[in-house]
Amino acid sequence: MRSFDEIYEISAHRHGGEEALEQSLPKPDPYLATLPEDRWLSIMTKCVFQAGFSWKVIEAKWPGFEAAFDAFDLARNAFMDDEKLDALLRNTDIVRNGAKIQTVRDNAVFLMELRQDGGAGEVFGNWRNDDFVGLLEMLKNAAAAWAATRARW
């Protein structure tokens, strides 16, 4: 698998350089700053579950996801214990993929950590429009830090 830096270099080359690539990337929407934390976790979860699955299936089951994950309350999901995880793995109202279910807990922790910087809406909604790659790097670094923490367990 290629690293982020390799993909970035290939993309920059194909788009006429780094500056041209940066100009072609989508920019964050200021509306994002107004989204409550639970909606951030909901959207992140939907994206995770749609990857590799039929989007129609995920959409049809979405009310079950909302109920199963406590309306995506950050604290409840960040502190999800093994008993809750096991219950989710048996819940037919959602897609029962253990790795994807665990991302809900991981992403809830990540979103709670963003509170020290004003919260997800503040961080993502007010990210500089000319630094989309920086946003992707921040997400990559957060994921790597979480993976390192999880490996120590």
Image (cartoon, rainbow, N blue to C red):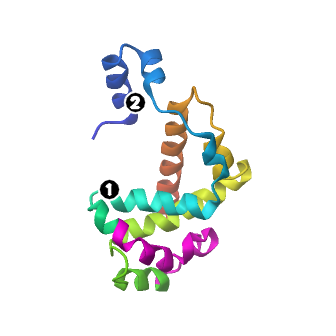
- 19 versus 46 height, above or below: above
- Amino acid beneath label 1: Ala
Residue 95: where, in percent of width, then height?
A: 33, 73
Q: Residue 1 carries which label?
A: none
The dot on residue 5 is: 2
Q: Is residue 60 visible?
A: yes
Q: How crowded is mark 1: few (under 14 residues within 10 Å), some or many (20 or more)?
A: few
Quadrant including the N terminus: top left
Please tell me which residue lies in front, 15 or 151. Answer: 15
Rendered location of residue 140, percent (x, y): 48, 43
In this view of the protein, which residue sits in the foreground, 108 or 47?
47
Residue type at tag 2: Asp
Structural distance between the alpha carbons of marks 1 and 2: 23 Å
Q: Position of residue 97 (x, y in %)?
A: 33, 71
Q: Which of marks 1 and 2 is nearer the N terminus?
A: 2
Using the image as rendered, state which of residue 105 and residue 141 is in the foreground. Answer: 105
- Looking at the rendered structure, the secondary structure element under dot 2 is helix
Question: What is the chief secondary structure element of the magenta stretch?
Answer: helix
| Magenta highlight on residue 77 | yes
Q: Residue at x 42, y 78 (%)?
A: 64
Question: Which label sits on residue 51?
Answer: 1
Q: Residue 101 sits in which quadrant?
A: bottom left
Left or right for 125, reference 20:
right
Q: Can residue 151 be seen in this view?
A: no
Where residue 98 appears, x then y in whole percent?
35, 72
Which residues are the magenta region?
59-82
